[in-house]
Amino acid sequence: MVQSRGSGRPEGLRAARLLMVLSSISPLFILWAIRGNKVIPDRYFIGFCALMVVLPNVFLWLRIRIAKRQEDKRELVVGKADDHRDHILVYLFAMLLPFYSEDLGSWRYLGSSLAALTFIVFLFWHLNLHYMNLVFAARGYRVFTIYPPADGNRLTGKASHALITRRVSLASGERIIAYRLSDTVYLEADQ
Amino acid sequence: MKLNFDTDKVSVTEFGVGLDEGDGQTFVSIPVDADVQAALREMVASTWHAMQRHDDGPTKYEPSEKHGGTEYLYLPLKDDLATVMQNLHNAANLPVNAGVLADPTAVFSYLARMTDDKGRRLTALRRATQFKGILKSKGRLVRMLDDSLRIVEDSVFKLDTDFDLLVDSANVHILRPSGFEFAGNLQDAILAAVPQNIGAVQRDLPFVDFSGIEEYASKHPRAARYLASIRSQKETKNIDKTALRALCKTNGVEVQVKNGKVTVADGHEMDFLEVLDRRRYQLELVKGSPERFRAGSRQRIGG
């Protein structure tokens, strides 16, 4: 999990983070669309699922494009780095599979599933877990949590960041140039 | 002097502001678009050009000197007086806070941090006087929209044409000494450093009683500056006791010898520090009419 700023200031790009969370759960809507359900006709349900898949991912693509166009990048110094491939597994088993196996056969079950999904979305948004995305994993990216160096400099930032990169490891002291997707999530610029 | 940074091959440009938050200065990063980044790079280039226009090259910054509005000075980044700049330059991953300009009262400076294609870093800093100045004109700024003038409702900030100083891996390059002193919190740092500076000078001059001078300098910033300058010049070693007393006498600085130590009379502390800082001299161009002078600024010539 990526730590928010210690000063208590709100994290920026709130709407962007929400859409990135929706993007991260978009595979669930693909599974739901394939399964269908008994209470909503397929054309509406599949349309809704398609919208929930396309819109957030288009937004994510746009966010990356805007960050690149506006040169919205910065240098991050690695103090310590944790590889969080396991987060994808947790995400897969803790969210995708349970929701997929949920019974959507009645309005009540459908409502409870959507309510539970809303809680999950809120938690992902609140805990800055919006970097967990199967699209990134499928394209060979890894997610690292990088902690700032303990250099004794009181001006050095105290927050950790999520770095999406194709690297397989990060060494302490390494300096990375990355695009800002949100204040805590960065995508390494092409080398 | 060269800048240890290639201003033509900048790969990252970040913008940030310095905040005075009561418990000390902090710096935060604010995301800016490509146009603002280009403007910041132009400011750095014009700062460097302005420095190059000073033909006599950079001289080392000395806290006791009275500097002009713009001068090209330098200070090694490892110098004690550059601690704030050193911390800022070496700080990693400044916190991002895009909302900080919603209440700009605590903003005292703004900065650019750049990285070139070789991974070298440059920090540029400017006192936020003009930057915030235009906020007072809110509701008075107009712009042409369609074919009529309209009030600009947004908060508008103004970038200057250059920075007060640039910091590379080796030096602080200073264009506006007052900006450096303000942003570097130098007055407080110099006053706080009085005991250490006294200790260092005392080691070189064990025959001088500095107790009265320490008390005086801890309350008088100008004296504290002289003291910092005397220490940084490292020219107090091997000063001859007799020569020092003779120079004091020539320049009307009252000193006495008590218990084998040279003691400065009350009210002559500044005068004595000026003697140690090589600012007091006497001429006698007209025979029998000696003239005493105090140098506001001095520069070593010859050996």
Image: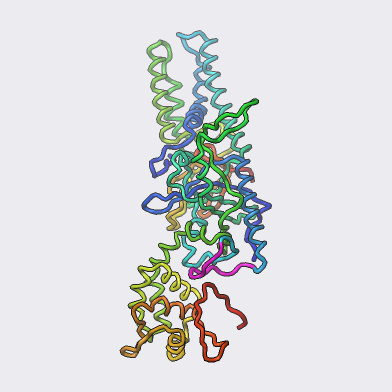
Residue A189 occupies quadrant: top right
Residue A116 occupies quadrant: top left
Q: Position of residue B300 (x, y in %)?
A: 58, 78
* A125 in relation to B182, above or below: above
* B59 in relation to B286, above or below: above
In front here: B148 or B31? B148
Q: Position of residue B242 (x, y in %)?
A: 43, 91
Asked if residue B63 lies in the magenta stretch, the reply is: yes
Q: Position of residue B89 (x, y in %)?
A: 52, 56
In front here: A46 or B46? B46
Q: Position of residue B37 (x, y in %)?
A: 61, 44
Query: The magenta stretch spans which residues?
Result: B57-68
- Image color mode: rainbow
- On the question of residue A184 being in view, the answer is no
Q: What residue is at 54 percent from the left and 40 percent from the top? A: A180
Q: Outermost residue, left direction?
A: B259
> The N terminus of chain A is located in which quarter?
top left
Q: What residue is at 46 percent from the left and 90 percent from the top? A: B243
Q: What residue is at 42 percent from the left and 11 percent from the top? A: A105
Q: What residue is at 52 percent from the left and 51 percent from the top? A: A77
Asked if residue A50 lies in the magenta stretch, the reply is: no
* B255 in relation to B85, above or below: below
From the image, give the main secondary structure of the stretch colored magenta.
loop
Q: Is A119 placed left or right of B70 in the picture?
A: left
Q: Is B32 placed left or right of A120 in the picture?
A: right
In front here: B58 or A37? B58
Number of numbered labels in the structure image? 0
